Amino acid sequence: MRSFSPVHVIGGGLAGSEAGWQLARRGVPVVLHEMRPVRSTAAHKTEQLAELVCSNSFRSDDAQGSAIGLLHAEMRRLGSLVMRAADAHKLPAGGALAVDREGFAAAITAALEGEPLIAISRQEILAPPPDWDNVIIATGPLTSPALADAIRALTGEAALAFFDAIAPIVHRDSIDFDIAWFQSRYDKVGPTGSGADYINCPLTRAQYDAFVDALLAGEKMGFRDFETATPYFDGCLPIEVMAERGRETLRHGPMKPFGLTDPRRPAAKPYAVVQLRQDNKLGTLFNMVGFQTKLKHGEQARIFRTIPGLAEAEFARLGGLHRNTFLNSPKLLDATLRLKAAPRLRFAGQITGCEGYVESAAIGLLAGRFAAAERLGERPRLPPPTTAHGALLAHITGGHIETIDSSPRSFQPMNVNFGLFPPLGSRAPRGAKKQALCARALADLEAWIGAAVPQAAE
Ligand SMILES: Cc1cc2nc3c(=O)[nH]c(=O)nc-3n(C[C@H](O)[C@H](O)[C@H](O)COP(=O)(O)OP(=O)(O)OC[C@H]3O[C@@H](n4cnc5c(N)ncnc54)[C@H](O)[C@@H]3O)c2cc1C
């Protein structure tokens, strides 16, 4: 049997864990370098691999009508460790795939520790040593400063930064269920839900107006030096910033009341609703959906306790904001995620400019497969751009355009979404476009898997 020198994966988060697993499954040895617990980040709390630093949701699990659900399905089909662990530790969350974060990370850690081809090294890598010929850098949005400096020196590009955000978590037994009630929006059951997975706190118009006023007046956390010139990422805006954009903005965003009716008061239509989603397996903790914030902690507790049902709320965790680090990938990376200026280095995960746990893991999956193919003397095969993997990869490595009008634009992180997919050749019937895109993706993925005849590398 041939033996290979190892591929070095730096970072044991969502992307690095998946990349290491994919390499080992192809018979390629791996050294997975994770700096925790020797050194931690601003968001990680444990030494587990693939720790979820904020929400416990992998978002919609609908593979027929949502791009993220499609990505789940494709990853399952491609033997993803992250999806295997998520499925094994899922929690009820309506149509979403939510996971028990401790069980999930423990399962990933155990699988990687138990894999004979993977050696786990707990050390911070300051810069990839020159004798590592095949490296995957998956150090995430909170890449350690020394390595970030080394990457900057290699790429010649300043890393861009923006804010990500943490939503508060509330102890369930501190919520007043004379006011709040359980219900998923439109009673949607989903794969593991009951149709009543969210806790809903209703606001009248007067209560909503007072809440918006409190958000606007509330004291915010100061910006640190490195954050001052950083724009907010639109998908993760703090609630007080949303409130600043217009009094009705929250009512059409995280506080939308549609599809939610208190069965005890069916005639009383709330003007706005705050939803809380289960956060741990025991069902004792619930997070406030979409309530990322930069309000000071004392202000958060004071203002959120004005929400009906949360007057006595006990917070297991309050909200916060974090920096992100990502490359100008369309310019810097080739089609298989290698740094054009130093092709022995490949990038994976959020640092490439994808956004989200699942997207980071999916890009890790591809990076692992590409690196394995190289090590095995095969030519890495790109997934079809009609698949969720292919669409996301194309966005990162070339789908982005620098300018779409006369104003300067820059590459920004992106969740997977149908806007990244090539349009359908023929017009789908009204309302069936998403389903058609999903069906095409899954068929093309099967053809891609079926055509996996290794070709010699050039
Ligand atoms: C505060 C915050 C909240 C977020 N919330 C969400 C959310 O709710 N939902 C969502 O979908 N996405 C969220 N994201 C975005 C993103 O999905 C996650 O950050 C995700 O974990 C990214 O996966 P990754 O593998 O790229 O990085 P990570 O999962 O962060 O993994 C990177 C790993 O590299 C290690 N590392 C860093 N530098 C070094 C080094 N020099 N040497 C060795 N190891 C190193 C780190 O310790 C870490 O374990 C959030 C991001 C942040 C920062």
Image (cartoon, rainbow, N blue to C red):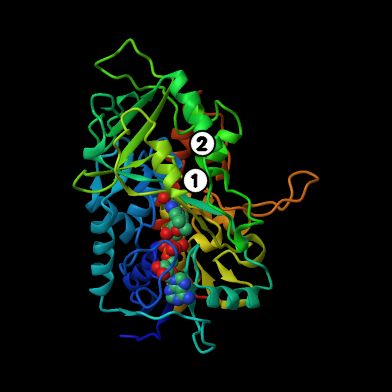
Q: Quadrant of residue 37?
A: bottom left
Question: In the rendered view, would you say 87 is above or below 303?
Answer: below
> What residue is drawn where x is 61% and y is 78%?
342
In percent of width and height, residue 349 lies at: 48, 62
Q: Which residue is mark 2?
A: 215
In percent of width and height, residue 281 lies at: 21, 48
Q: Which residue is mark 1?
A: 295
331 vs 67, left or right, is right
Tally of numbered discs: 2
Question: In the rendered view, would you say 13 is above or below 38?
Answer: above
What kind of element bears circle 1? loop
Furthest toward the right, the residue is 406
The front one of 428 and 179 is 179
In percent of width and height, residue 17 lies at: 36, 67
- Quadrant into which the C terminus falls: bottom right
The front one of 208 and 35 is 208
The front one of 141 and 8 is 141
Mark 2 neighbour class, 10 Å CA radius: few under 14, some 14 to 19, many 20 or more:
many
Question: In the rendered view, would you say 156 is above or below 243?
Answer: below
Ligand 1: give its quadrant.
Answer: bottom left
Image mark for residue 116? none
- Residue type highlighted by circle 1: Leu
Among numbered discs 1 and 2, the one appearing first in the sequence: 2
Q: Are marks 1 and 2 in contact (CB under 8 Å)?
A: yes
> What residue is drawn where x is 53% and y is 51%?
221
Can residue 56 be seen here? yes
- Residue type highlighted by circle 2: Leu
Can residue 192 be seen here? no
In percent of width and height, residue 251 lies at: 49, 27
